[in-house]
Amino acid sequence: MRMNKKNRQQFDLLKLLVKKEITLRYKRTYLGFLWSLLNPLLTSLVLFVAFSVFMRFEVENFILFLLAALFPWTWFSASVAMSSNTFIGNVSLIKKVIFPKHFLLLATIIAQLVNFIFSLPVLIVLTYYYGSTPSLNWLIGIPVLVIVQFIIIYGLSLIISIANAFFRDLEYLVNVLISLLFWMTPIVYPLEAVPEEIRLFLVMNPVTYLMQAWRDLFLNNILNWQYIFVSMITAVVVLLTGILVFKKLDKKLDEVL
Amino acid sequence: MIKAENLWKSFPMRRDRPGLKEFVVNAPKFLKDNNNRFWALKGVSLLVKKGESLGVIGRNGAGKSTLLTLLLGVAHPNEGSIEVSGKRTPLLELGGGFHPDLTGIENIIINGVLLGNTEVEIRARMAAITAFSELGEFINMPIRTYSSGMQMRLAFSIAIHTSPEVLLIDEILAVGDESFRKKSGNALMELIKGGVTTVYVSHSMDAIKKVCDRAIWLEQGEIRAEGETGLVVEAYLKTQG
């Protein structure tokens, strides 16, 4: 691959930031990178116990049903939550070195994406376990949904990371909103289980379509183009808003860091 | 080449930045809050030709460091324009970008790339950088085990080995112990005299006289004098009693 020097340097920088993000997170633990896989698995275990032992949700193949949406959700929520700290946690870097700041956001999202990709084998094993096989749809659906979700996360991160430098309260608000969003998105329960009159709230939530599209792919082996299309529109809107907000606040960032 | 025209830079005078709640409650006040600002730079213009070195002197709070951050590009002026051709290398507070859990070697690579080099270039200079830093075995240890002097030595070694084209220096010639100070001073001198464009902020008039072709004297955000280094320094020292 031939690149000019500037592109090469930018590529190296992003690569190193991603590597740093991945290796540093668990650097001083014994299990290291394994935690990236262990974390969502343990969370699923908790939810699995809660919903199939205590609350007795009658859903077929519940564990696959759950993980099909929970893994992508983990990528989403972890990246968005971390973005609030990206700039205020890297003040010394941002104030002393000139480099594309948004690389820090991209690095977080890519590192979390790597975690997500490493959790895919779990889904594949489960699919076989429940007597089905991953089809060609996966080869199309996964890249498309990854790109769409990447853009949505990136757009949100642009807004949250820079806005949090100006209003530090946002960080705490974001965490609450993420857990609200988690319960308002059909992840641990099916959309159909929600009473008709409240379902409207879920239908208005753009993340619903994204998570449903993932679930349709992994659980039902369907490419739900309608939902994918809605998610694409969400991605475009969020990204444009993000760029706009970022550009506007970036000029004053040095005053508040 | 560095060309800056009519730079104005202000900071809000608020004691603390508002939180979201306070902001919402007092939104109109904060949005109008433009008169209550501290002007760190008021219409500064300068031109540093390629290979030239410009000294910046003045009392504390005169706007010297603000000027450097604008030239570096990590802060934006409220008004005015800046043009810099060439790769900018800061020598401000050293070691800002280091990560404590990464080893010396790992930090060299990431810092070198941050300063505008490719990874291959940095690896090619690894031996020179580690040798210059005199860190020995410590180079494979996490930075958190370093003393502050060791960190500064490493940061300095990286910066001067990344083929800088524009050097922005803020009072750093005093790195490490006596022998390292001498060595780093010489290395810096070699770069500056070797065609690197330099802006040099210092309180040491001797250093300024030794390093700079020209100097400007900042006072309360304005240029009070500029010209040949010796003359500007002399004029400045007269007012300092």
Image (tube, helix red, strand yellow):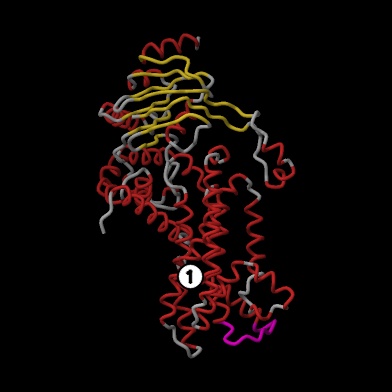
Circle 1 marks a residue in which chain? Answer: A
Mark 1 Cα shell of 10 Å, populated few (<14), some (14-19), many (≥20): many
Query: Is residue A126 shown above or below B91?
Result: below
Q: Residue at x 37, y 24 (%)?
A: B47
Query: Is residue B21 shown above or below A35?
Result: above
Q: Where in the figure is residue B203, as x and y percent of width and height?
A: 44, 22
A217 in magenta: no
Query: Is residue B216 shown above or below A71?
Result: above
Q: Residue at x 48, y 40 (%)?
A: A95
- Part of the protein shown in magenta: A52-63
Figure quadrant of residue A139: bottom left
Q: Where in the figure is residue B109, as x and y percent of width and height?
A: 34, 49
Relative placement, left or right, of B185 versus B25 is: left
Dividing the image into 4 quarters, which one contains the N terminus of chain B? top left
Is B148 or B222 nearer to us in this picture?
Answer: B222
Q: Residue at x 42, y 19 (%)?
A: B216
- Amino acid on which the number 1 mark rests in the picture: Leu
Q: Residue at x 64, y 78 (%)?
A: A191
Q: Where in the figure is residue B127, as x and y percent of width and height?
A: 26, 46
Figure quadrant of residue B36: top right
Is B83 or A233 nearer to us in this picture?
Answer: A233
